[in-house]
Amino acid sequence: MENVLDIYTAKPDPTRPLVCLDEFSKQLLSEVAPPIAPRPGTKECPGQPMRSDAEYVREGSASAFMIAMPHLGRREVFVGKEARRTALDYADAVAFLCDVIFPEAEKITLVQDNLNTHDVASLYKRFEPAKARRLATKIDIHYTPKHGSWLNMAEIEIALLARSALHKRIPSVQEFRNIVAANVERRNKTPHPINWQFTSSDARIKLKRFYPDLPPI
């Protein structure tokens, strides 16, 4: 935990950008009947919000990777070809991070959770050894502790995306892609760096119960 917190409070280094990565999913649902459009209010009659039938059809799910850049106030979302989150999709997300977002970076400080697919071994499952090795040496991985996903700042961006764009029914993977892409484009027009406040010193006070109770030396 303190390793991640110290990374967050370190001075930003343009040659080693900080990136937080996390996965998220959206259940795809289609309507059984067209929604009733909202009706504006008048002096004589109150307005009415859009109404949808309580019934729906399950259309599977779509998964993606949130790539948050806290110091830059930017975010990107990687959606694989099949909108899944397998080891191969993770490898493609890392390649997108290294070769598209930060092709000139010397090293990328990558904070992520310790899911079994979040490992350099996934790169070797997806790419030939030379490319897998190149990507593996470009990322400096730091894992959040078990049950400590709240330390991953990518979750902040996922929550914002869910509230602003993913709260309604989405019937297909393509519409999921379109909605996510539009939201990311809009958000990146006005970058908002994340001002992380919780430090290692705070953790030693507020989370004292997780530290060993040692006698004074």
Image: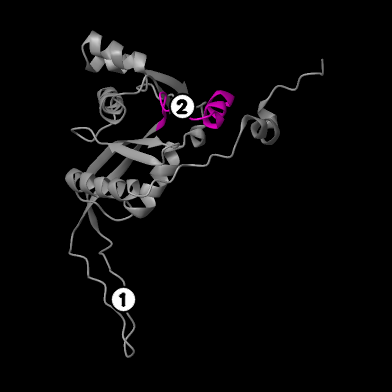
Crowd class of label 1 (few under 14; some 14 to 19; many from 20; radius 10 Å): few
Q: Which residues are magenta?
A: 1-20
- Which mark is drawn over residue 48? 1
Q: Is residue 6 magenta?
A: yes
- Amino acid type at circle 1 is Gln
Q: Residue 160: give its label.
A: none
- In primary-sequence order, the first of circles 2 and 1 is 2
Seen at 20% across and 43% down, the residue is: 173
Residue 10 drawn at (x, y percent) = 54, 28
Asked whether 143 or 26 is in front, the reply is 143
Residue 59 appears at what percent x and percent y? Answer: 20, 46
Colouring of the image: one colour
The secondary element bearing badge 1 is classed as loop
Is 216 left, or right, of 172 in this rendering?
right
* Figure check: 199 above or below 38: above
**Label 2 is placed on what type of residue?**
Asp
Q: Which mark is residue 13?
A: 2
- The image quadrant of residue 34 is bottom left
Badge 2, how many Cα within 10 Å: few under 14, some, many 20+? few
- Give the quarter of the image for residue 114: top left
Residue 55 picture quarter: bottom left
